[in-house]
Structures are given as structure tokens and as C-alpha cells.
Amino acid sequence: MTVEHSSTTVNQPQTVEESTESTTRSRVLNAVLEHGPVSARDLGRRMDLTPAAIRRHLDALERDRFIEVTMVRRRGSGAGRPARRYVVAPEGHERLGNDYLGIAADALDALRDLGGEQALRAFVDQQFEHMERRYRPTVEAAGDDVAERLDVLVRLLSADGYAASANTVKVGPSRHRVLSAQLCQGHCPVQEIATKHPEFCEAETRMIASLLDVDIRRLSTLAAGAHVCNTHVPLSRPQQTAGRTGTPGR
């Protein structure tokens, strides 16, 4: 809190207003984390804030290096000008992360030094196998439909801090368009570790493919420097593999 002194009085900012402003700013940051890349207009509409209010909060978050602007080309805009979109900045991810990740990263380095790459991969695979076993009953309860399984997976990932969302897209020429989805993860709780050990991203990708029972393709990752983890998910399976007959092998 800033305290201003004068010759006769001490003026303190109104704590209620400060608290409200801080709470709203945190909500804006969380919205950027969940929906980014996102426009100021879309954020204002989602949060029921005026254009002036949302700009004030975005400017403050950008000044504090929590968020940054990225230029995104609009779908179907051809060679038009890219649009300004807000995403959480790398420094923002670090400040939102866990302070103990550095210790965990050092421990993994020591594990690799002692047991080699095989020991490290075995450890990482084990972590995501635990995660998959925890998710699988809920995902499979959604049935065989990929889109419904994906919706469930999004909720499970978000509950674990990944700020996940999914958007449906159409791929290919108009006559032969294939319906697919993009799974976005706006935050990675282990980003600092995954940056040093890409085995985490590889194991997570295998887990997602196994749970959805489709061949997915990782388009970008936070660990590799992208603004979000983005995964292409086909919403239909080849005819010969439609329907589940059991848990796919890893």
C-alpha cells in the first residue's frame, strides 16, 4: 500500500477499492490464462467490464509483465492484418508457477545423472500413468464419442491447473472438410521442469491420445516457448478402429 505524506495529514488509499481492483485484475489474468490468445473486446464481454475498465486492467498486467500482446491472423482473413491478442507472458507463467519446481528440476537432473535417461523416462512415464488412471474412469464414462471425451478431459485438466479449453475447427477443402478440435492448455504447472525435460511433454501427449483413443498431433507447447500448449484432436476415428475394445497399449 502506498502512503502519501503531507505537512498535516497522512492520506491512505481506500482499502476496499484497492481490494476490489486487485480481485478484478486477478480475474482478468485468469481469463487471459484460460482463453488466450484473446482480444480485449472478448475479455470485456466475458467479464461484463466496460472497454475502459478492461483496458485499464490489461495495461496494468502488461506493465507488470504478467501478460503480453501477440499478433494472430484471423481465420478466413486471407492476407489481412493480424489481430492483437493477449496471452500470459513467460514471466507471468513463472510468477504463477510453483516455487518448488526449481528443486524438483534439480532432483530430476540428479536422477538422470545417477540412472541415465532410461531412469528419467521411467519416472516421467510413471507420473503420467498415475494421472491417466485417475482420469480414465471419468473420461470413459462419457462414452465413445471423441468430442464428449474431450470435454471431460478439458474439465479434468483445468481442475489440475492446466487452464484447458477446446475449440472445434474444420480442416480441408469445403467438399471434404473434416471436423476436428484444438485442445489448448493455457498454463502448465510443471513448465519449468518440462522446459528442461521434454519427456514430460512427450508423456503427456501419449496420455491424451490414450484417453481420447485417437491419434493426436502436438502443434505447440509452453515448454518450447509458445504462448499455449496446442494439440490437434480429430473428432472421428477410422472405421476399422471405431469403438473401444479395451485400454490401448502404451
Image (tube, rainbow, N blue to C red):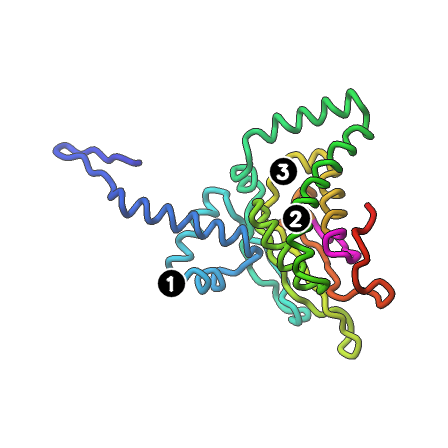
Is residue 28 highlighted in magenta? no
Q: Which residue is mark 2?
A: 135
Q: Which of pointers 1 and 2 lies earlier in the amino acid sequence?
A: 1
Is 198 left or right of 46, judged from the image as shown?
A: right
Give the Cα distance between marks 1 and 3: 35 Å
Query: In the image shown, does 172 or 185 lie closer to the viewer?
Result: 185
Q: Position of residue 72 (x, y in %)?
A: 62, 60
Mark 1 vs 2: CB contact within 8 A: no
Give the Cα distance between marks 3 and 2: 18 Å
Looking at the rendered structure, the kind of residue marked 3 is Val
Q: Position of residue 216 (x, y in %)?
A: 76, 56
**x 66%, y 63%: residue:** 148
Q: Indicate whether 121 appears above or below 69.
A: above
In magenta, the rendered stretch is: 209-220
Q: Name the image quarter holding the N terminus.
A: top left
Res. 190 mark: 3
Mark 3 vs 2: CB contact within 8 A: no
Q: Residues within 10 Å of mark 1 (few under 14, many from 20)?
A: few
Tag nearer the camera, 1 or 2:
2
**x 73%, y 65%: residue:** 235
Looking at the rendered structure, the kind of residue marked 2 is Tyr
Q: Residue furthest top?
A: 114
**In what element is the residue under mark 3?**
loop
Q: Which of pointers 1 and 3 lies earlier in the amino acid sequence?
A: 1
**x 56%, y 45%: residue:** 89
Res. 50 mark: 1
